[in-house]
Image (cartoon, rainbow, N blue to C red):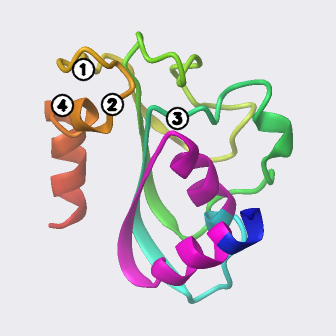
Amino acid sequence: MKERIDQIVAAEIQGECVVVGHALGSVVSHQILTSIPAGQANVSLFMTLGSPLGLSAIRPHLKRRPLLKVGRWVNACDPRDVVALVERLERPHFFDQIENITDVANPLGNAHGIGGYLRDAKVCRSLSQAFK
């Protein structure tokens, strides 16, 4: 199942693009961005929302290499999000410089919901900057 999901997602990461991964989607996207062939994509922004990437149960399974094809990596977390229990993604677990937004306040009652993340002003500002 993992291989099939990776194939589907990797096929969509082509040329100039922005990649937004929510929850498990951030793990799938991270793994693909550490292994896609040179020249396949130029990712101006990799945004992780409500990501479990920082969890000790996930980190040992990640490929430990920089995301060479990524211009910026922004990680956003609602501190009440039970999936994103590690609010900040940073060294020594990740090679890349990551901008962490750790004060998302999801107004929808579900601190993990994608809708609340996409309503956050800092998240929206980071996304809009990627398209300028």
Cβ atoms at labels 3 and 4 below 8 Å apart: no
- In percent of the image, x 54 and y 24: which residue is there? 83
Q: Which mark is residue 120?
A: 4
Other-residue count near label 1 (Cα within 10 Å), few / some / many at <14 / 14–19 / ≥20: many
- State the SS at label 2: loop
First in residue order: circle 1 vs circle 3? 3
Circle 1 sits on which residue?
106
The residue lying furthest to the top in this view is 80
Instruction: Give the percent coordinates (x, y) of residue 1.
Output: 74, 64
User: Which comes sooner in the sequence, label 3 or label 4?
Assistant: 3
Q: Amino acid at mark 1?
A: Asn
Q: Amino acid at mark 4?
A: Asp
Residue underneath mark 3: 51
The answer to whether 117 appears left or right of 7 in the picture is: left
Look at 33% across and 30% down and name the residue there.
113
Q: State which mark lies toward you, 2 or 3.
A: 2
Tags 2 and 1 in contact by the CB under 8 Å rule? yes
Secondary-structure class at tag 3: loop
* Residue 27 spot, x, y in % from top left: 62, 48
Magenta stretch: give its range.
5-31
Q: Amino acid at mark 3?
A: Ser
| Badge 4: residue crowd in 10 Å (few <14, some 14–19, many ≥20) | some
Confirm or deny contact between disc 4 and disc 1 (CB under 8 A): yes
